[in-house]
Image: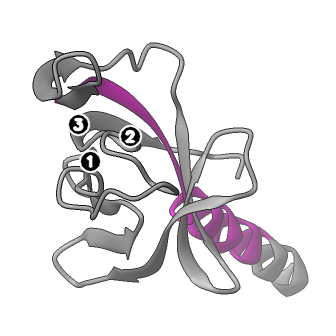
Amino acid sequence: MRVFLGVGLAALLTQGALAESSYICVPDEAVGFTYDRASHKWNDTRFNVADKKYVVSHGLRGWEWYEAGSSTRLAVSCESNSAGFISCGGQEDVQLNTKSFRYQIIDSIGYTANPSSRFPEGWRNPRIEIGTCAINAKP
C-alpha cells in the first residue's frame, strides 16, 4: 500500500511539474512600422499574426521561447522571478506573466539600425505584439 501511494504521489507531482514547464501562446494583435522604399518613409501598420503560435518551455538551459514548429529560439537569456514573470532577451524582448497568462513581445531592431548594403533601411520591422498563453499539458 505504501508503494502504491508513493507512486501515485510521484505521478501527481510529475504531472504538475510538467504542466507548469510549458506554455502555448497565441498572439492577439501586432502593430509596428514598415519602411516604404518608394517614399523612403516609415509607416505604421498592423501585422498579420493569424497563423502564429509560440511555445515557452523550461528545458536544460532554463526557459526558452520558440515559434511553434521551429527549433530556433526567438529569445535567449530567459529568467523567471517570484512575481510570476518570465522575461527573455535576444532579437526580441519577451515578457510572459504566468499569473494573467498574457505576454508581450517588443522587437525594437530595425528603425535604429545603421543602414548598410548588408542591412538596408527597412530590413527589419519594429513591432509590439500582445497575446495570451495557456499551460501546455503536453510539452
Q: Position of residue 18 (x, y in %)?
A: 64, 63
- Estimate the spatial distance between the alpha carbons at disc 3 and disc 2, rounded to whole Å: 10 Å
Q: Secondary structure beneath disc 3?
A: strand
Is 100 left or right of 91, judged from the image as shown? Answer: left
Disc 2 + disc 1, Cβ < 8 Å = yes
Please report the residue visible at 44 percent of the width from the left and 13 percent of the height from the top. Answer: 50
Image position of 139 with respect to 61: above or below: above
Is residue 31 visible in this depiction of the protein? Answer: no
Is 69 left or right of 79, judged from the image as shown? Answer: right
Q: Position of residue 120 (x, y in %)?
A: 39, 47
Q: Quadrant of residue 27?
A: top left
- Estimate the spatial distance between the alpha carbons at disc 2 and disc 1, rounded to whole Å: 7 Å
Q: Which residue is mark 3?
A: 130
Q: Which residue is mark 2?
A: 133
Residue 51 part of the magenta-drawn span: no
Q: Which mark is residue 103?
A: 1
Image position of 138 with respect to 13: above or below: above
Magenta segment range? 8-32
- Estimate the spatial distance between the alpha carbons at disc 1 and disc 3, rounded to whole Å: 6 Å
